[in-house]
Amino acid sequence: MSECDLYDLRFSGNSLSWRGIRNKHLVICRLDRAMSNSAWAEEYPSRRSEYLSFEGSDHRPIITNFDTTRKKRKGIFRYDRRLKENVEVKQLITEAWNTKELNTVEGKISRCRREIILWNKKRHLNSQEQIEKYRQKLEDAMTEELNNAVLIEEVNALLKKAYDEEEAFWKQRSKQLWLALRESNTSYFHAVTKGRKSINKFSVIENEANQAVYRESEITKVITDYYQQLFTSQDGEREAIVTQALKPCISDKTNKELIKIPSPTEIKQALFSIHPDKAPGPDGFSACFFQSNWNTVRVKLISEIQQFFATGNLPKNISATHVRLIPKITSPKKVSDYRPIALCNVYFKVISKILTLRLQPILHDMVSENQSAFVPQRAISDNVLITHETLHYLKTSKAKKEVYMAVKSDMTKAYDRIEWEFVRLVLKRLGFHSKWI
């Protein structure tokens, strides 16, 4: 499947498509699949398949729906990281950012986005077209009777640059952060991008009653209802439990360090610790934009972040977030088979990063030793080792009078269900300053 660029179509129904006898055993398995390559999937973005009921055969029939009625949507703005070295664009950003009538970071970002979109329309960067143009120029230069070595060298350099830009474009689309840019990796990045698009596309989903829905409005309703139920607050007695379970451990000195106004150096370190190629938030700008234009944006960005720490008030729309559903398994069918991730604006990420970096050194004092995850120098794999040893003991134990058992509890979405009020009570009980809370 991988070699032939094939992907499973999104499917509904019972996927155990074959029933038969092997030796004396009944076997039921998924033997039949509907698949497509990336080109077909791009042509029919809302394709799906359905496993039907057994009828006259030991194989289930599979029906595939092309669904050509849905049109491709206009893409939203995403900052092209190839522009970070473009002198013309850097000058354009400087002029847009320093416009006097826009006095907030949000307004300046909006102006930069508008100017980059207009620049892109006039000077559209299509590296594939550039490659073809320079290849033709190189062919002409190499076949001329006169040997113009300077021209050949110049065209070769331009062609190499066009190839590098093409690879950089597909690298940022593929989200493959671990692999460095190399001339031979363009096809790999391209394939990964197509694969991700095929895998992540919503064309069918099953509701709580195991009924498959296909229309966009119905899919939206199923997803919304699921998270509406998951995130709805529930009543409960929390304050007494928190008071009984926790003791104050945050000193006044620690609180002063936590709520102090960050220095320009601290803000810069927080910004540059964010990976430049991570997915951007609703404003369309990744950390690469701010890092490559730091000299232009730093004064206003530092000023507003310091103002937030002084007042506790966050500017409007800065905390806006795109929620993206990522498949947890190969062939997701229900909403529970996806995990939500939040794509935040970089401005918001910088503030979060500062708070996180300040909190890290004191986590050991706050979190008990038996909590083996999410704290530096602790490993969740310790739990696996303990569980393995426990189960091994139960397996080998020959005790008859005192018999032990193991209980497996499912903690799915435990962290998604934490109440804001509970978090506030915990932080208050531990002794955090009200501004920090």
Image: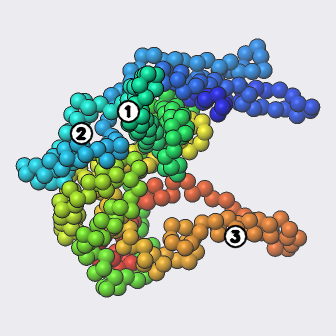
Amino acid at the residue labelled 1: Leu
Residue 151, label in figure: 1
Choose between 354 and 387: the one closer to the eye: 354
Q: Earlier in the sequence, mark 2 or mark 3?
A: 2
- The answer to whether residue 414 is above or below residue 337 is below
Choose between 141 and 39: the one closer to the eye: 141
Where residue 263 appears, as percent x and y from the top left, is 25, 72
Query: Which quarter of the picture shows residue 34?
Result: top right
| Residue at (40, 83) in percent of width and height | 249
Question: Which residue, as the protein is rendered here, is positioned at the far top?
Answer: 56
From the viewer's perspective, is 35 left or right of 419?
Answer: right
Question: Mark 2 highlights which residue?
Answer: 116
From the viewer's perspective, is 234 left or right of 204?
Answer: left
* Circle 3: element type: helix
Query: Which quarter of the picture shows residue 254?
Result: bottom left
Question: Which residue, as the protein is rendered here, is positioned at the far right?
Answer: 23
Query: Which quarter of the picture shows residue 112?
Result: top left
| Residue at (59, 24) in percent of width and height | 36
From the viewer's perspective, is 199 left or right of 111?
Answer: right
Residue 386, label in figure: 3
Question: Residue 260: in sight, yes or no?
Answer: yes
Q: Earlier in the sequence, mark 1 or mark 3?
A: 1
Where residue 244 appears, as percent x and y from the top left, is 45, 78
- The answer to whether residue 35 is above or below residue 118 is above
Amino acid at the residue labelled 2: Ile
Choose between 185 and 44: the one closer to the eye: 185
Choose between 313 and 215: the one closer to the eye: 313
Amino acid at the residue labelled 3: Ile
* Circle 2: element type: helix
Residue 77, label in figure: none
Q: Residues within 10 Å of mark 1 (few under 14, many from 20)?
A: some
